[in-house]
C-alpha cells in the first residue's frame, strides 16, 4: 500500500527509576502507547515498532549492540546498567577497582521526579496517507449520498456523492443498496466490497480520517479492476510477488533461528554440585 512506509528514528525515552530493572519493558510500554494515533513527529500513525538500545557507534561506524539488541562495549561484551550500590565520594557509581562507572542505559535527570533518559534506535511502520495517493479499503456502509469504508481495519474513509463517478448509479436493495456501473453491470460496489480510491484530503485531528474519491482512473471495485485494468493487474501481481518473497525470507529466518536454538539446547548441562565433584 502506497501510504505505508518504514522509518528509522533515534529517540530518547524517559523511564521512571522504579522501572530500572525492567528498562526494555518500560520503553516498550511507552512506545506502545503511541500505537494507532497520529503523531506530528512521525508525520503519520504508528502501526508497529521494534527498538534496540543506542550507545553510539563503534570504530567501523556500526551501532554498539549485540545480536539481541542489547548494548555492548568495545570488547563486544554485553553491558549492564549499574545499580549504584557501590559509590565513590561524589556519589557516583564505581566498580571494584574504584574507577567511576556510569549507567550505559540512561542518565539520571535532576528534578523532583528523577527520570532517566534512554536512547533507542527504533524501526517504525507508519501509515501516512497523502492527497492523490491510491489506497484500498473495505466498504462498511453506503447510501445514495456517500460510501463509507475502512482501511487496514482501523482508519475510516468517506466518499461523498460529488466524488463518485457519474457512470455509477445507486440501486436501493433490501441489503442496503449498491452502486452499479452504467457501462458494465458487473462493476458493482456494495457492502463488503474491496475498493480502490484516491485520497482527496486527510484530517489528522481526527486520527487520519480520509476523504476519498472514485473519479480518478483505476478506482472502483478491486476485483473488477484486476480483470479489466491491465496496468492495475500488473501492479497487483508485482505487489503479491514482493509479499511472497518477504514471507519466504521471514520463514527461512525463523527456521535458522530455531535450528540455532536447538543446537544450544543440546549442549550438555552440568549442575554446580556435579562440576564441584568432578573437580
Image (cartoon, grey):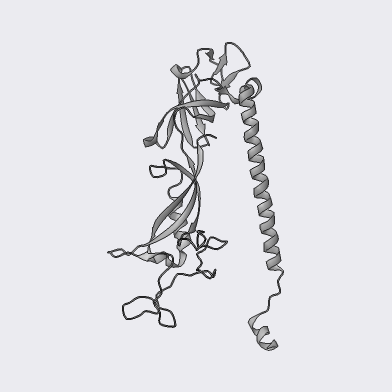
Residue at image coords 68%, 67%: 264
Q: In the displayed structure, does residue 166 sit left or right of residue 236?
A: left
Residue 160 location in percent, x, y? 44, 21
Residue at image coords 37%, 79%: 87
Residue 175 location in percent, x, y? 56, 21
Q: Is residue 145 visible?
A: no
The quadrant of the image that shows the C terminus is bottom right
The quadrant of the image that shows the N terminus is top right
Q: In the displayed structure, does residue 276 sit left or right of residue 105?
A: right
Q: Is residue 114 visible?
A: yes
Residue 206 location in percent, x, y? 39, 35
Q: In the displayed structure, does residue 237 sit left or right of residue 81?
A: right
Instruction: In the rendered view, tell whether residue 153 sits above or below residue 181.
Output: below
Of residue 33 and residue 259, the one placed in the foreground of this image is 259
What number of labels is visible?
0
Residue at image coords 47%, 29%: 157
Q: Which residue of the protein is positioned furthest toward the top in this rendering?
A: 182
Q: Which residue of the protein is positioned furthest toward the front in this rendering?
A: 59
| Quadrant position of residue 18 | bottom left
Residue 16 location in percent, x, y? 37, 62
Amino acid at each position: 500500500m502506497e501510504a505505508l512506509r518504514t522509518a528509522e528514528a533515534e529517540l530518547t525515552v524517559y523511564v521512571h527509576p522504579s522501572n530500572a530493572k525492567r528498562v526494555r519493558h518500560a520503553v516498550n510500554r511507552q512506545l506502545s502507547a503511541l500505537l494507532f494515533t497520529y503523531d506530528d513527529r512521525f508525520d503519520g500513525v504508528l502501526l508497529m515498532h521494534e527498538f534496540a538500545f543506542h550507545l553510539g557507534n563503534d570504530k567501523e561506524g556500526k551501532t554498539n549492540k549485540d545480536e539481541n539488541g542489547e548494548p555492548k562495549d568495545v570488547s563486544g561484551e554485553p553491558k549492564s546498567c549499574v545499580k549504584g550500590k557501590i559509590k565513590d565520594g561524589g556519589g557516583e557509581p564505581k566498580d571494584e577497582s574504584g574507577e567511576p562507572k556510569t549507567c550505559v542505559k540512561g542518565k539520571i535527570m535532576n528534578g523532583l521526579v528523577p527520570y532517566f533518559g534512554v536512547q533507542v534506535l527504533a524501526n517504525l511502520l507508519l501509515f501516512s496517507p497523502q492527497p492523490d495517493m491510491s489506497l484500498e479499503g473495505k466498504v462498511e456502509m453506503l447510501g445514495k449520498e456517500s460510501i463509507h469504508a475502512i482501511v487496514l481495519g482501523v482508519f475510516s474513509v468517506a466518499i461523498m456523492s460529488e466524488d463518485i463517478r457519474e457512470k455509477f448509479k445507486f440501486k436501493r436493495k433490501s441489503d442496503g443498496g449498491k452502486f452499479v456501473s452504467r457501462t458494465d453491470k458487473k462493476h458493482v460496489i456494495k457492502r463488503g466490497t474491496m475498493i480502490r480510491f484516491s485520497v482527496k484530503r486527510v484530517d489528522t485531528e481526527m486520527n487520519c480520517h480520509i476523504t476519498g474519491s472514485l473519479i480518478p482512473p483505476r478506482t472502483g471495485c478491486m476485483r473488477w479492476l484486476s480483470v479489466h485494468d491491465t496496468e492495475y493487474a500488473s501492479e497487483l501481481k508485482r505487489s503479491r510477488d514482493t509479499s511472497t518473497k518477504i514471507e519466504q525470507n521471514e520463514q527461512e529466518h525463523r527456521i535458522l533461528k530455531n535450528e540455532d536454538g536447538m543446537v544450544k539446547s543440546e549442549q550438555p548441562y552440568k549442575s554446580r554440585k556435579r562440576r564441584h565433584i568432578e573437580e
